[in-house]
Image (cartoon, rainbow, N blue to C red):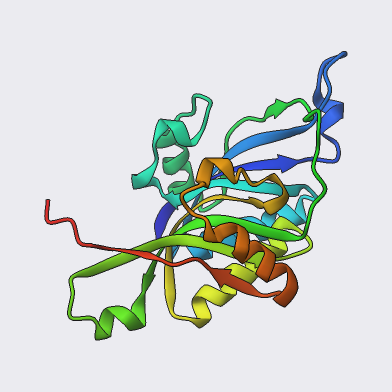
Amino acid sequence: MKAIYVSVRLFDPNGQEHLKAGQVYGGEVRLFVLKATDVAAGLLELADAIEASESELVSIQYAAPVTEFLSEHFDFDVDLQAMIKDADNLGEICVSPVYSYSPAEDQPTSIGVFAGLIDAYDREFALESDRPYAGQIGWAVSVGETCIAALKALLADLEQDQFTLRSLEHFKDACDFDYEAYAHEASIKDIIAQVKKEKGTLYSDFFSYEKDED
């Protein structure tokens, strides 16, 4: 078991009730820490917990082992070490305080396709490769009526193809995807369009990397 952190955006249908007069609820950001066998297992457990709370998962900003945590992965001060300790001692999902945000002026309509950047380890390829393979990075695009449905479809597809997920970044509705920020990855727009037609999960070309000798 290892400690996993997941930085997310959520929408709580009762969120407005917790704000002061004059404030308008548009959603909230939270940081979760939990113990799991791997990142995929941690994401599945958290997804089930969010569904049980009747909140809506809007996006996953970052998800990885806590050893990979950087301050820019969560915009607010948190005592990560205390959260890790509580997750270890209590065996529960630990969560940061609520940090709410106002609704966007222009809210795009969901297209039922979600995209994110994954770092994964191809177990089958690693056995066959004669190179010092350590993992690969690329875009994953999955269909789902909700972010959780698309996430579960992605995780199931990765497991079927014998991939171990190491991290997931910026997994969100493709209607909110900033194509200009990723102009170097021209194929992502085509993959999103293709997934809308064919359903399921598709991937961009992967960039493979080798073990860091340092």
**Residue shown at 51%/64% (left/top)?**
40
Q: Is residue 40 above or below residue 156?
A: above
Tell me where residue 207 appears, x and y as whole percent.
Answer: 35, 62
Q: Is residue 76 above or below residue 198?
A: above
Q: Nearer the viewer, residue 187 or 174?
A: 187
- Residue 164 is left or right of residue 203, and the answer is left
Quadrant location of the N terminus in the rendered image: bottom left
Question: Among all residues in the image, which is located at the extreme left?
Answer: 214
- Residue 71 is left or right of residue 115, and the answer is left
* Residue 171 visible from this viewpoint: yes
**Residue shown at 79%/62% (left/top)?**
145
Tell me where residue 158 appears, x and y as whole percent.
Answer: 51, 74
Tell me where residue 22 appears, x and y as whole percent.
Answer: 87, 13
The quarter of the picture where residue 69 lies is top left
Q: Nearer the viewer, residue 108 or 122?
A: 108
**Residue shown at 53%/40% (left/top)?**
181
